[in-house]
Amino acid sequence: MAWELSDLDAERVEHAYDGLLAAAPTELERTAEGQLRALGEAPLRATPGGTAEALLLHRALERGHGHPILVAAILAEVGRRAGLPVGVVAGAAGHFVAHQRLTEALVLDPFTGRLVDADALGVLEWRCGHQVAAELLDALQPRYERVGDLVRALHVARMRTTLPFEDTENAEQRLRALAAKLN
């Protein structure tokens, strides 16, 4: 997705991932809780709101902060690269990183890097990569529209319609509405 929206230096991105992996000593931890806690040591935090830049991978890696959805996805990828069975979970309380083998109801908060009680967050559901991509695109499009970058907003809307969901009506409707603004 980031390659579609801006110039991206793949080597810099890989180097940044390597740095996050080195800063999160997950290999020293034997328990699922310890591994998730170690993942929280990575120097990357979520920040509320933000511009479109907060939703772009290379910008979050450069700055050490980004949108909560993106930071949760990056931390999950760092965990995956470390061989951990982790992924993104989300609900009304936001996006978090969860460990599939953790028996306690704990998730990693991308804002603080700390473990929090998942039971206190309401219903959380696992998100696949397509769902995370859809949520990122849904957050990105209005940010481009607000700054008048209709070309990128339209590109994001088109990308959103290509995701493999049964119901794409809302995404297609947003694309048509945005395209109508250009006519």
Image: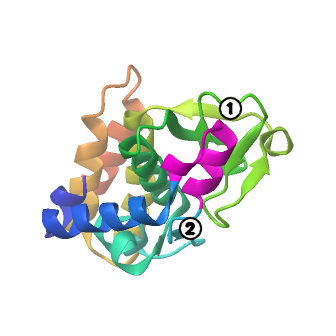
- Eyeballing the image, is 40 above or below 127? below
Dot 2: element? strand
Of residues 131 and 43, the one drawn nearer to the viewer in this rendering: 43
* Residue designated by label 1: 102
Q: Residue at x 35, y 68 (%)?
A: 19
Q: Residue at x 74, y 28 (%)?
A: 103
Q: Can residue 176 be seen in this snapshot? A: no
Closer to the eye: label 1 or 2: 1
Which residues are the magenta region? Answer: 26-40
Q: Residue at x 31, y 26 (%)?
A: 164
- Eyeballing the image, is 130 above or below 152? above
Task: Specify the principal SS of the magenta part.
Answer: helix
Relative to 40, 85 lies left or right: left
Mark closest to the chain's N terminus, 1 or 2: 2
Q: Quadrant of residue 61?
A: bottom left
68 in the magenta segment:
no
* Image location (x, y in percent) of residue 154: 24, 57
Q: Residue at x 55, y 69 (%)?
A: 45
Of residues 124 and 19, the one drawn nearer to the viewer in this rendering: 19
Pointer 1 local density, CA inside 10 Å: few below 14, some 14–19, many at least 20: some
* Image location (x, y in percent) of residue 132: 44, 42
* Image location (x, y in percent) of residue 22: 40, 63
The Cα atoms of the two marked residues, 1 and 2, are separated by 23 Å
Relative to 7, 43 lies left or right: right
What amino acid is labelled 2 in the image? Ala
* Residue designated by label 2: 46
What amino acid is labelled 1 in the image? Leu
